[in-house]
Image: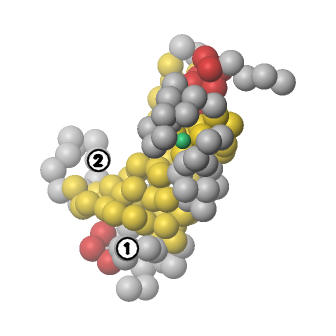
Amino acid sequence: MHTTMRQFRDRATKYGLERAECTDCGRMNDPSAELCYHCGGDAFEDVTLSRRGEVKTYVVQHILPETFDTPLPIAIVETPEGGKVLGMFTEVDDPHAIEMGEQVTIELKRFDRQDGQVLYEPKFRREGGETA
Ligand SMILES: [Zn+2]
């Protein structure tokens, strides 16, 4: 069944791991993209990213509103499909022990409700525990 752009955007907002794969160059785009960021193509396939990936970069945030636990690592994780996901780590004892290239599990945590829809955001969990 054909998915309209609006349905795709709604689902992407709801579930957080939906991407648009360019049928010309194969690279991942945000589901709201109308043209490929990489090659300018305009045809896409819907892709749901895997729930694991590798840390490409991260920062440790020390100053945040008091509803957050600090220091808080915030990372960009790349999935095997080549999709990049921005999110916060969850339950990390030593944020400075995170390694570049480390494999993490991507969990979707419920964070809000909008127009009757539950919204989810990605959170990263270390797979190897706290062994540094
Ligand atoms: Zn492209």
In the picture as drawn, the residue positioned furthest to the left comes out as: 63
The answer as to whether callout 1 falls within 8 Å of ligand 1 is no
Residue 68, numbered label: 2
In the picture as drawn, the residue positioned furthest to the bottom comes out as: 132
Give the vertical position of 117 relative to 84 (above or below).
Answer: above
Label 1 Cα crowd, 10 Å radius (few <14 / some 14-19 / many 20+): few
- Disc 1 + disc 2, Cβ < 8 Å: no
Amino acid carrying mark 1 in the image: Met
Residue 95, position as x, y percentages in the image: 30, 69
Amino acid carrying mark 2 in the image: Phe
Which element is circle 1 on? Answer: loop
Quadrant in which the C terminus appears: bottom left
Quadrant in which the N terminus appears: top right
Give the vertical position of 16 relative to 123 (above or below).
Answer: above
Which element is circle 2 on? Answer: loop
Q: CA distance from mark 1 to mark 2?
A: 24 Å
Residue 41, numbered label: none
Instruction: Inspect this view and state whether residue 59 appears.
Output: yes
Mark 1 vs mark 2, foreground winner is: 1
Disc 1: which residue: 100
Q: Residue at x 45, y 59 (%)?
A: 77
Decide if residue 7 is on the left or right side of residue 106.
right
Residue 128, position as x, y percentages in the image: 51, 79
Residue 52, position as x, y percentages in the image: 58, 61
Query: Which comes sooner in the sequence, label 1 or label 2?
Result: 2
Q: Quadrant of ligand 1?
A: top right
Decide if residue 6 is on the left or right side of residue 63.
right
The answer as to whether callout 2 falls within 8 Å of ligand 1 is no
Instruction: Inspect this view and state whether residue 118 appears.
Output: no
